Every structure is written in C-alpha cells, then in structure tokens.
Image: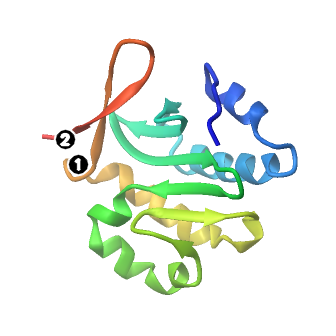
Amino acid sequence: MKIDAKDANGYVAAVDPVRRPHLERVRALVKETVPQATEAILHGMLGYSCDGRLFASLGAQKNYLSLYLCDLSTQPELRATHGEALARLKMGKSCINFTSTDDLPFDTLAAILAAAPHVAGRAVAVKKTAGKKAAPARAR
C-alpha cells in the first residue's frame, strides 16, 4: 500500500483508522527509545536515522504493518541475543509483520532499538536526493 505523504504526521493520518493506533504505538516506542533519532518519510515509510544512518522503518502495508529493524540483518549478535522473543513473530531478516501490537514483545524491541543506533558503519546510511526522497547508500 503506497501512502503519499509529505511528512510523518501526514503518513500516520493516512493509515487505516483501525490500524493507526498500532502504528502510533510502535512509532512512540521508537521515538521514546531513541529520542535523538530523526524521523522522515524514507522509501515510502516512516524512517528513523541517527547521524544519517537508517536503523528502523515503520510502514503500513495492505493487510498488515511492518517494522524494519535494519540491524537485525547486519548484527548477528542482536538476533542471537533476542532470538527467543523474535522466534514467535512473523518476520524476515529484519522485517517484523504484525496486525496488532498485542503480538509484539515491546521490551525486546526497545532493547534492539536502543542498541542499534550506537553501532557504526555496518548498516545502510541515508543519503538525501533531489525531490525529498532518500536513496540508500552504504556507510563507509
């Protein structure tokens, strides 16, 4: 589901009202856990970066919501540390798909979010391009 929004608040406002509270709860978790993060529309979703380094994204899909924890795919120790809590979730390398926040282990997500922005050089950095969109660029 593509949401055309100029900013994060516009993105949230465009989400289905039934799923919006779940998106807002995860959004609040990211912002509370990593208050220094910059929130922007990146790759058609809410993107969170620190010092230009993307570490999480949150998006509304047609039938579910997705939380991308970028460092789960680049930092095997994070996945190993939190593997038991993550094992019961529907997820890929770094993407957790959910329909309700009742299904999410918030303590685990907070721990992953708190650790991720502080590890430099292994994840995707955000590079601004013309037209207010962002393109991925490898961190050097």
Q: Nearer the viewer, residue 10 or 63?
A: 63
Q: Kindly indicate the quadrant of the structure image that contains residue 66.
A: bottom right
- Where is residue 39? Give x, y as percent: 53, 32
SS under mark 1: loop
Disc 1 versus disc 2: distance between alpha carbons?
A: 8 Å
Dot 1 corresponds to which residue?
120
Residue 20 coordinates in the image, percent (x, y): 79, 46
Image side of residue 46 versus residue 134, left or right: right
Residue 41 lies, with reference to residue 24, above or below; the image says above
The amino acid at mark 1 is Ala
26 above or below 91? Answer: above
Q: Position of residue 36 (x, y in %)?
A: 47, 36
Residue 2 rendering spot, x and y as whole percentages: 62, 36
> What is the tally of numbered marks visible in this picture?
2
Mark 1 in CB contact with mark 2 (< 8 angstroms): yes
| Residue that badge 2 annotates | 139
Q: Amino acid at mark 2?
A: Ala
Mark 2 secondary-structure assignment: loop
Q: Residue at x 37, y 65 (%)?
A: 72
Name the residue at 55% across, 51% down. Answer: 33
Q: Is residue 86 above or below residue 136?
A: below
Q: Judge left or right: residue 97 versus residue 77.
A: right
Q: Earlier in the sequence, mark 1 or mark 2?
A: 1
Q: Quadrant of residue 7?
A: top right
